[in-house]
Structure formats: structure tokens, C-alpha cells
Image (tube, rainbow, N blue to C red):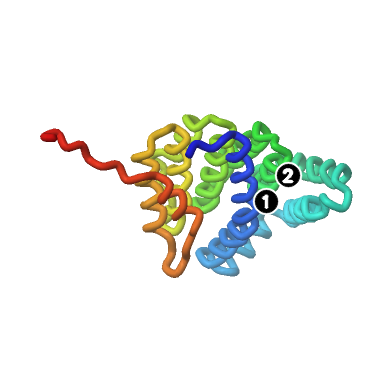
Amino acid sequence: MVESDEEQLEQLKNWWDENGTSLIFTVVIALGGVFGFRAWETSVQQTGEAASTVYEDLVAAVANLESNEAAMRATADSLFSRLKDEYGGTTYAVFGAMHMAKLAVDSDDLATARAELEWALEKVDDASLETMLRVRLARVLNAKGDATAAMTVLVNYEPPAGQIASVEEALGDTYHSLGDMTRARAAYQKALDHLEDGVSKPILEIKLADIPVTQPVDEGA
């Protein structure tokens, strides 16, 4: 079943709500595990306490949007501009771009979401974060109706082992948008095969089930 632009946008919003914050914290924890607490602490210190403070204020502004949307949005925009201008080479700025991209998606402003994610992708130097950004950018591009651009973000990209499922699902969505059901089905199946033990994803299973298995043509018939 081919989804309308409105349905794809709604799916993008729901996906971001379900995966956004948890994925960010997962990456932070993973970074801590790889480099160790001392190395992570040193990295944070090197970025500067000021960058950390600006980012924390940005997160607070985003969290309080419902209480005073206009004022908090203006504050978030100002803080993110400062992060980009003064601390653009830090992970804080990348995380900030992800927050701002989500706000843009929630406002149906996919052009801004694309711009923020593309900016962050140019700055990131961590493989896990790069994968997250590529998947999110591909989803935004698919929602914009530009599956060809989404494919360029994902094709030939090799994610870390623990993120293969998310990339393959995004690839499946992109192939689906392009009308290539054979490759879409293969990507969805690969995504299911690479889910962590004990993890189930009913939506992914539904996507796979919705694509019928293509029967080979019997040339002798």
C-alpha cells in the first residue's frame, strides 16, 4: 500500500517521538562505555563548560515549549544559533541540531529539518551518531517525497553492527517509496534478522507482511 505524504509525515513524527530521546541517551551511554568514564569526562571538559550550559538550556527550552510556545521556541532558536556559531565542532551542537530538526518535523517544516540534519552530518565524527543522523535524514527526505535523495544517504553505508536493523528498515522504506518491492522486502527481512535478541518490532513485521512474496515465473508453463 502506497502511503500519502501526510501519512508518511505522521509516521515520521511518531517514529521520532518513539526513538528520539532514547537513541540519544543510548549513544551517550555507549560513548561512555567505549572511552570510559575518565575519557568521557575529559572530552566534556575539553568542549568547555559553556557549550554544556548552552545545550542544557536548549534542552530545557524545548521541554517547556507547551508552557509558552512562542517564547520558548525563540529561546531555543537563539541558543541553537549560539551552539552552531560558537561551539559548532562539539557533540553538543550535533545533539542540538537533532532537537531542532525534531521541532521542525513537529511543525511540518521538513526543509528546515533536512537542513539541520545535513549540517549535523557534516560535523559528526562518531559512527553511532552518524548512523542516527543518516536514518533520520532519510526519513525526512522520504516524507518530503524525495526517495532518491534518501537512497544516497543510506546506500553503501556500513553502520556499526548494533545499528544495522535501523538502517535496513530505513532502506526498506526508501525502496518502498521508489516502488522496488523486492528490495524493500529484502531490506525489511534483513532488519528483522538483525534485531537484538529478545527485541520485537511489530511495525517492522507488518511492513514485511504487507509485501507479498514474488513468485518465480515458470518459463516452461
Left or right for 219, reference 195: left
Which SS class for mark 2? helix
Picture quadrant where residue 198 is located: bottom left
**Relative to 210, does residue 161 appear above or below in the rendering?**
below
Which SS class for mark 1? helix
**Relative to 211, does residue 63 appear above or below in the rendering?**
below
Q: List the residue tagged with mark 2.
A: 83
Q: Earlier in the sequence, mark 1 or mark 2?
A: 2
Residue 185 visible in image? yes
Picture quadrant where residue 101 is located: top right
Q: List the residue tagged with mark 1.
A: 92
Q: Amino acid at mark 1?
A: Tyr
> What residue appears at the point 41 percent right and 43 percent down from the top-left corner?
157
Residue sitting nearer the eye, 210 or 102: 210
**Image quarter (top left, top right, bottom left or bottom right) of the C terminus:** top left
**Relative to 115, does residue 87 appear above or below in the rendering?**
below
